Image (tube, rainbow, N blue to C red):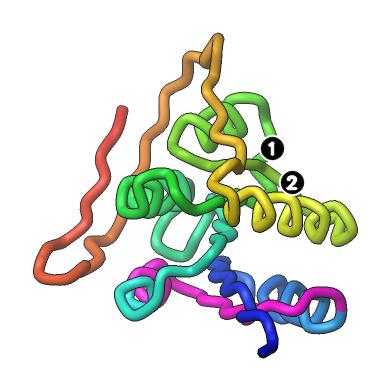
Amino acid sequence: MAPVKKTIFHVDDDIEILNLVKSVFDKRLSVNYQGFETVEALLQATKNKEPDLCIIDLNLTESLGAGFAVTKVIRDKVEGKMPIIVMSKRSHAKDISLALEFGASDFLAKPVDFDLLIEKVMYLLRGAESNMFPVHRIKKPVKATLEVHLKPVKLDEAYLYVSSK
């Protein structure tokens, strides 16, 4: 019996990035990859199937910095059991620190080094199988103000609103 393919969900509002990552994964990994251009589409898909790993961009159509909220929602939903890679152009120390604080397992800056992405995905999927993937705890968090404004996204019968200052 063939091993079950792992499922990776990826949300990024840049369709070219989604297509490029899909192409690389199709050639180099044996996974079921699904790309989503909106938070709503990603959250809807997670209702039907929990992925083995998520890749999340920080700046999405819904708002700049929406990926922080999405990371937190998914991390809370799966209670730390699934690796999350944040992949973003926002690569300042405070952005990386906040992404990890909100629940990301790892961070990868754009433009993407695809060899590194493949290595991180393989490492995190192996760790998730044994429930040993890294969960980062920031020892000295960077103090920063984060203001996120999102359109409401319907999740089940509730709406997701994020407000932080």
* SS category of the residue bearing label 2: strand
Query: In the rendered structure, are the residues bearing label 2 and label 1 in contact, judged by CB atoms less than 8 Å apart?
Result: yes
Q: Secondary structure at mark 1?
A: loop
Tell me which label, 2 or 1, sits earlier in the chain: 1
Q: Which residues are magenta?
A: 28-43
Q: Which residue is mark 2?
A: 109
- In the rendered view, tell whether residue 102 sits above or below residue 126: above
Viewport quadrant of the N terminus: bottom right
Farthest residue toward the top? 140
On the image, the x and y values in percent for residue 90 come to 64, 42
User: Within the image, what quadrant is residue 145 found in?
Assistant: top left
| In magenta stretch: residue 39 | yes
Residue with the mark numbered 1: 91
Q: How far separated are the C-alphas under marks 2 and 1?
A: 6 Å
Q: Is residue 88 above or below residue 114?
A: above
Q: Residue at x 64, y 42 (%)?
A: 106
Q: How many marks?
A: 2
